[in-house]
Image (cartoon, rainbow, N blue to C red):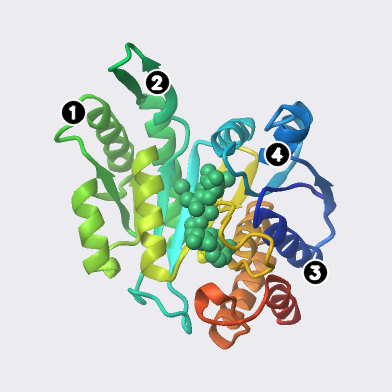
Amino acid sequence: AGEEIVVIPGDGVGNEVVPAARSVLEAVGEFEFVEAEAGDAVKERTGEALPPETYDRVAAADATLFGAAGETAADVILPLREAVDSFVNVRPARAYPGVDALRPETDVVFLRENTEGVYAGHESRLSGDLSTLTRVVTTSASERLAEFACEFVADRGADGFHLAHKANVMRETDGRFRDAVVGVADERGVETEEVLMDAFATRVCLDPAAFDVVVCPNLAGDVLSDLAAGLVGGLGLLPSANVGPERGLFEPVHGTAPDIAGEGVANPAAAILSAAMLLEHLGYDGEGADVRAAVEAVLSDGPRTPDLGGDAGTDEVAEAVRSRL
Ligand code: NAI
Ligand code: MG
């Protein structure tokens, strides 16, 4: 007990859902919380979206709970993922009983490569007419992701995973990604099924039950997991974990939700489910499962926030989750 958890609410609804998730963590364990700043607001005040002390705290803490940053999101989240050496972003997209979902049978976990692809950021303006982007794919990062995926499916009791790519067009980069991932899985005796990422977008809408664990390059994982959020009832429900070899950074998939920020009606489920993933990362599997079960019970029986058709506020939902623990 007594692990240090850095808490970064950030901007917008981050300031509503992160305190809600922290209150749930406080209800299940004895942790040492360290509040830190990042995002548009701190940039406005100090000129820096990610103050060095925030980076250093995240790099040293057992785990971090992050909300969202606004326009400075890329300046905040990319370095923070690097601070925990996160090579995989775990994004479960699950429909919950009681929540109106387009596809109630959806239960898919995206394992998104978290360090390279087009988000490695090598963009150039070559002329007034031409800009370019270099896509980065290494065998080592692809293999590290594949090793994680093999362990993940074993823990989940699954036989294998799908692998989304577009190696028929991006033969060199996605070809390397595909060969590395399939190579590791074959060695470990884990089944893989390849699916072209554009075809995957259609297939997951028509038949989400056909998919369980899906390994994706960085951009594809970002886009396809948001698409899956639409299948299960919206962004207010999707947690994520940026996992590194030792540390982790846990955050809802959603952003600052400027259209509802400040009203106290943001759905805290994604942030609280991210806190459940944080608990499991720290080895508190029982507590993590309890929190998830409490969220599921509240999603099923209410109270619910307006995005799910209810009229409850963020704090009322968080209080209902705590009272179920
Ligand atoms: P967004 O996720 O903030 O909002 C998209 C839609 O989902 C909005 O209608 C919003 O009201 C709704 N929504 C999101 N979270 C919700 C919640 N907890 N409860 C209820 N409804 C919720 O995405 P958007 O609008 O594209 O981006 C807004 C800002 O957030 C931008 O400045 C963007 O850069 C930033 N952003 C930051 C991220 C991060 O820090 N990791 C991730 C995505 C966006
Ligand atoms: Mg995204």
Q: Is residue 254 left or right of residue 246?
A: left
Residue type, label 2: Glu
Q: Do we see residue 98 in this rendering?
A: yes
Frontmost of labels 2 and 1 is 2
Spatial CA span between label 1 and label 3: 50 Å
Please name whichever residue, 267 or 110, is drawn nearer the observer in this view of the structure.
267
Please name whichever residue, 93 or 302, is drawn nearer the observer in this view of the structure.
302
Instruction: Say the numbered circle drawn on residue 27.
Output: 3
Frontmost of labels 3 and 2 is 2
Report crowding for label 3: few under 14, some 14 to 19, many 20 or more residues within 10 A (C-alpha).
Answer: some
Residue type, label 3: Ala
Image quarter hosting the N terminus: bottom right
Spatial CA span between label 3 and label 2: 45 Å
Residue type, label 4: Ala
Q: Earlier in the sequence, mark 2 or mark 1?
A: 2
Instruction: Return the x and y of residue 173 as percentages of the image width and height.
Output: 27, 27
Please name whichever residue, 121 or 45, is drawn nearer the observer in this view of the structure.
45
Q: Earlier in the sequence, mark 4 or mark 1?
A: 4
Q: Earlier in the sequence, mark 3 or mark 2?
A: 3
Report crowding for label 2: few under 14, some 14 to 19, many 20 or more residues within 10 A (C-alpha).
Answer: few
| Residue of label 2 | 123
Please tell me whether residue 220 is drawn above or below residue 160 in the rendered image: above
Spatial CA span between label 4 and label 1: 38 Å
Task: Name the residue furthest left.
Answer: 168
Identify the residue at image location x=38%, y=33%.
Answer: 143
| Residue of label 1 | 171
Instruction: Return the x and y of residue 41 as percentages of the image width and height.
Output: 72, 41
Identify the residue at image location x=64%, y=31%.
Answer: 83
Instruction: Say the numbered circle drawn on residue 38.
Output: 4
Report crowding for label 1: few under 14, some 14 to 19, many 20 or more residues within 10 A (C-alpha).
Answer: few
Report crowding for label 4: few under 14, some 14 to 19, many 20 or more residues within 10 A (C-alpha).
Answer: many
> Hey, which quadrant is residue 310 in on the image?
bottom right
